[in-house]
Image (tube, rainbow, N blue to C red):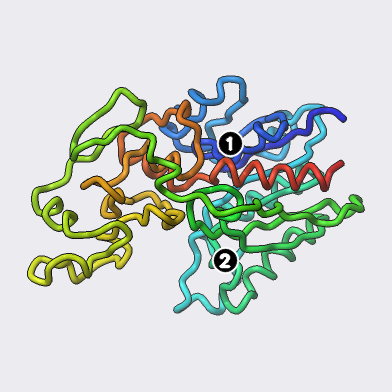
């Protein structure tokens, strides 16, 4: 069998791409809009064809030119879907919300290139939003494009990722394919813990750098350092003396990773979630390791953008498990 092919839309730093590469797929092209993110993608995937563009500006004709004569086995990606407001939005269908226009672009590309399979990844609440009506609406759009579709919420920790990260994946097979729809098989054995994932990195103090790419500790204020020193391994803000305990804001802040468990979900801002044994937030390198990026994968740009790239990525190890399931379906 020839090497299977894929197109990565909304590619970001390339977590989805890396997983499919590692599963033996060949990249036809990827699309990403942000120039800093594109620089990171190009640095780590010098052999890929990256299109730095707004996907809405790519016509069907230009997409077909990019595809060339190749058969497309999979279109993958996680289009940003922002229209989650429950109040004042009940009467508006998901795809009609202008904030979700990028979902429609994903469907358009799938319709244009007619891959054997597609995988769309997104936040888990998409599955249950409006008592499941949003999920059913999304599925109808892909069915109208010629696909059998199923959706499932999966947890990254079940696939070898040291992180409790729940995501919905929509998997579609072209209707002329007679394979069953397959979701990735869970990994046997205990889930990987935070300490297993990042314990190998050298200790750093607040504001300290290292020679390892992206292993640079952010500089915390004296007040923040005073608060965090009270929080024990796996503890939270309740460990902080009441006189200085923060009482407002995100309840996920002012917690320590539990060294014996998978991480909480990594997002684009983990400044107030502390290392299980050191008085600082995790470095970008440590966050990337929890996302299962290899240590050789370098994130460019400022530290804030680096964290966003890591937090928004599909964990490559989970992406590889998805890719292996895709291979089963297209054989």
Residue at 57% of width from left, 52% of height from top? 102
Q: Which residue position holds label 1?
A: 31
- Assess whether mark 1 and mark 2 are in contact (beta carbons under 8 angstroms): no
Q: Secondary structure at mark 1?
A: strand
Residue closer to the observer: 186 or 209: 186
Residue closer to the observer: 96 or 286: 286
Q: Which residue position holds label 2?
A: 126
Q: Is residue 123 above or below residue 112?
A: below
- Residue 94 in percent (x, y) is at 59, 67
- Residue 290 in percent (x, y) is at 45, 44
Q: Is residue 130 above or below residue 317?
A: below
Q: Is residue 127 above or below residue 182?
A: below
Residue sitting farthest toward the top: 46
Classify 10 Å Cα crowding around label 2: few (below 14), some (14-19), many (20 and above). many
Q: Is residue 201 above or below residue 170?
A: above
Residue at 88% of width from left, 52% of height from top? 179
Residue closer to the observer: 182 or 42: 182
Asked whether the viewer can see residue 100, the reply is: no
Residue 328 in the figure: left or right of residue 31: right
Q: Marks 2 and 1, how far apart in space? A: 23 Å
- Residue 245 in percent (x, y) is at 15, 67
Classify 10 Å Cα crowding around label 1: few (below 14), some (14-19), many (20 and above). many
Say which of marks 2 and 1 sits in front: 2
Mark 2 / mark 1, whichever is N-terminal: 1
Per the rendering, the mark at residue 112 is: none
Q: Secondary structure at mark 2?
A: helix
């Amino acid at each position: 069998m020839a090497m299977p092919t894929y197109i990565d839309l909304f590619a970001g730093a390339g977590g989805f791409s890396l997983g499919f590469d590692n599963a033996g797929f060949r990249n036809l092209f990827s699309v990403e809009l942000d120039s800093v993110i594109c620089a990171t993608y190009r640095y780590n995937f010098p052999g890929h064809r990256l299109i730095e563009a707004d996907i809405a500006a790519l016509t069907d004709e230009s997409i077909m030119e990019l595809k060339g004569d190749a058969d497309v086995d999979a279109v993958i990606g996680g289009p940003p879907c922002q229209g989650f407001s429950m109040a004042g939005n009940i009467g508006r269908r998901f795809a009609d919300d202008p904030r979700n226009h990028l979902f429609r672009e994903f469907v358009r590309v799938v319709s244009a290139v007619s891959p054997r399979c597609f995988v769309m990844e997104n936040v888990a609440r998409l599955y249950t939003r409006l008592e499941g009506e949003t999920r059913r609406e999304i599925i109808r759009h892909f069915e109208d494009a010629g696909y059998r579709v199923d959706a499932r919420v999966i947890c990254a920790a079940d696939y070898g990722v040291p992180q409790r990260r729940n995501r919905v994946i929509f998997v579609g097979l072209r209707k002329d394919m007679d394979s069953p729809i397959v979701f990735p098989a869970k990994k046997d054995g205990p889930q990987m813990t935070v300490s297993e994932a990042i314990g190998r990195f050298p200790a750093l103090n607040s504001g300290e750098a290292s020679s390892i790419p992206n292993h640079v500790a952010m500089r915390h204020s004296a007040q923040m350092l005073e608060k965090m020193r009270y929080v024990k391994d796996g503890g939270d803000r309740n460990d902080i003396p009441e006189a200085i305990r923060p009482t407002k804001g995100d309840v996920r802040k002012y917690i320590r990773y539990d060294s014996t468990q998978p991480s909480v979900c990594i997002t684009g801002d983990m400044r107030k979630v502390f290392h299980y044994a050191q008085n600082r937030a995790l470095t970008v390198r440590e966050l990337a390791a929890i996302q299962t990026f290899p240590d050789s994968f370098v994130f460019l740009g400022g530290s804030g953008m680096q964290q966003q790239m890591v937090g928004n990525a599909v964990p490559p190890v989970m992406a590889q498990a998805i890719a292996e399931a895709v291979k089963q379906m297209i054989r």
